[in-house]
Image (tube, rainbow, N blue to C red):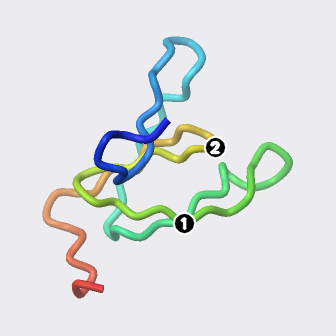
């Protein structure tokens, strides 16, 4: 389910079911493959519009590090 601003995915967290992985990143553009291997998922590219984005496949949350994310305005 997408959030109202269509900036990323915002699943309803279910304790004990939804992974609570939060990965700090320095770029607004990130790729997620669920960790790769047999437990992974297809590689998807996500863009952090505000401060974080959640992968629609594995529910990992990517959070922008403090002071990061300029990306040259591209």
Q: Is residue 38 above or below residue 46?
A: above
Q: Nearer the viewer, residue 5 or 33?
A: 5
Q: CA distance from mark 2 to mark 1?
A: 11 Å
Q: Position of residue 37 (x, y in %)?
A: 81, 53
Q: Is residue 5 above or below residue 48?
A: above
Figure quadrant of residue 64 = bottom left
Q: Nearer the viewer, residue 36 or 7?
A: 7
Under circle 1, the secondary element is: strand
**Outermost residue toward the top?**
15
| Residue pictured at 55% horizontal, 24% vertical | 18
Contact between labelled residues 1 and 2, with CB atoms less than 8 Å apart? no
Locate the C terminus by quadrant.
Answer: bottom left
How packed mark 1 is, by other alpha carbons closer than 10 Å (few <14, some 14-19, many 20 or more), is few
Q: Residue 58: which numbered mark, if any?
A: none
Q: Nearer the viewer, residue 40 or 54?
A: 54
Under circle 2, the secondary element is: loop
Q: Position of residue 59 (x, y in %)?
A: 54, 38
Figure quadrant of residue 27 = bottom left
- Image check: 9 left or right of 27? right
- Image check: 36 left or right of 6? right
Q: Position of residue 48 (x, y in %)?
A: 34, 60
- Image check: 69 left or right of 2? left
| Residue pictured at 66% horizontal, 49% vertical | 34
Q: Mark 1 highlights which residue?
A: 45
Q: Residue 57: which numbered mark, if any?
A: 2
| Residue pictured at 47% horizontal, 30% vertical | 11
Q: Is residue 46 above or below residue 52?
A: below
């Amino acid at each position: 389910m997408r959030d109202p601003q269509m900036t990323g995915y915002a699943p309803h967290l279910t304790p004990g079911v939804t992974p609570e992985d939060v990965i700090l990143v320095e770029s607004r553009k990130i790729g997620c493959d669920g960790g790769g291997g047999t437990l992974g998922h297809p590689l998807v590219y996500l863009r952090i519009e505000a401060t974080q984005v959640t992968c629609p496949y594995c529910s990992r949350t990517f959070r922008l590090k403090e002071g990061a994310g300029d990306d040259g305005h591209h």
